Amino acid sequence: MGGRDTDMVLLDENGIRCDGRKVDEPRRIMIKAGVLKNANGSAYIEFGDNKILAGVYGPRDVHPKHMSNADTGILRCRYHMVPFSVAERKNPAPSRREIEISKVIREALEPAVMLEKFPRTAVDVYMEILQADGGTRCAALDAAAVALADAGIPMRDMVSACAAGKVADTIILDVNNEEDQAGQADMPIAYMPNLNQITLLQLDGVMSLEEYNKCIEVGIQGCKTVYALQKKALAEKYFPEEQT
Ligand code: UDP
């Protein structure tokens, strides 16, 4: 972020972006539910060139016990980049950034998960970023929400995430890595589509109030696109005979 690479053409005169997309076009998204045998629930997502696995365990006993809550279950989330996920080998130890992203993902999922049904237990969500290309927190969240549903954890709604942003003074949907690095703003959004509630909104960059409102509107449209694919992934696993 922050207009570092000024030579790159982020938006050409025909309104086409550096990867050939239109301003309101998301990258190719593929989601598969139930890909791991040993987790209670799991999902794999490809979001453009992002490749992410999510696995869920629980509800299960909390260790250490003093971390448990007698009134409710707790959600624990770990977002982790594998060493080969980025161009320069990533140290596998948790970075400040990964700790922050784990926290915001937990806070984005908590409103949807009916943790009050499972006092004293924990639901653990692990997200492994196998390949990163901008927008990993949203894509990881999308996989995590499907993995939670696949684990049979009761949820008030799905959580669907997609970023919007600003390049060349234009609001765009689904910011890729180049746009994140050289663009003007990046706004990851997570959204509960049936409850019509935003559960994550971050903004890196500067925009006017008008652009801000437009960015939210565009981002929510992206979340709705993701939601359809999350439902499709679960339907393909649980109702395969109904899929054409
Ligand atoms: N990135 C990287 N090395 C790192 C962390 C991030 O190359 O150690 C890249 C990666 O492609 C990531 C992008 O920078 O997707 C943007 O990172 P950001 O912190 O904005 O989070 P994201 O957009 O992935 O949610």
Image (spheres, rainbow, N blue to C red):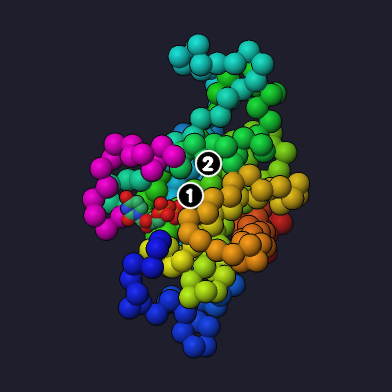
Residue 61: % across, % down: 53, 17
Question: The C terminus appears in which quarter of the rendering?
Answer: bottom right
Which region is colored magenta? 86-100
The answer to whether residue 209 is seen in the rendering is yes
* Residue 151 or residue 173, whichever sits in front: 173
The crowding category of the residue bearing disc 1, from other C-alpha atoms within 10 Å (few below 14, some 14 to 19, many at least 20), is many
Q: Residues within 10 Å of mark 2 (few under 14, many from 20)?
A: many
State which tag comes first along the sequence, 1 or 2. Answer: 2
Q: Quadrant of residue 163?
A: bottom right
Residue occupying the far front of the picture: 208
Secondary structure that dominates the magenta span: loop
Quick check: is the Cβ at mark 1 less than 8 Å away from ligand 1? yes
The quarter of the picture showing ligand 1:
bottom left
Residue lying farthest to the bottom in this orientation? 13
Residue type at mark 1 is Arg
Residue under pointer 2: 105
**SS of the residue under disc 1:** helix
Position above or below: 193 against 166: above
Amino acid type assigned to the residue bearing label 2 in the image? Ile
Question: Residue 31: in sight, yes or no?
Answer: no
Residue 137: mark in rendering: 1
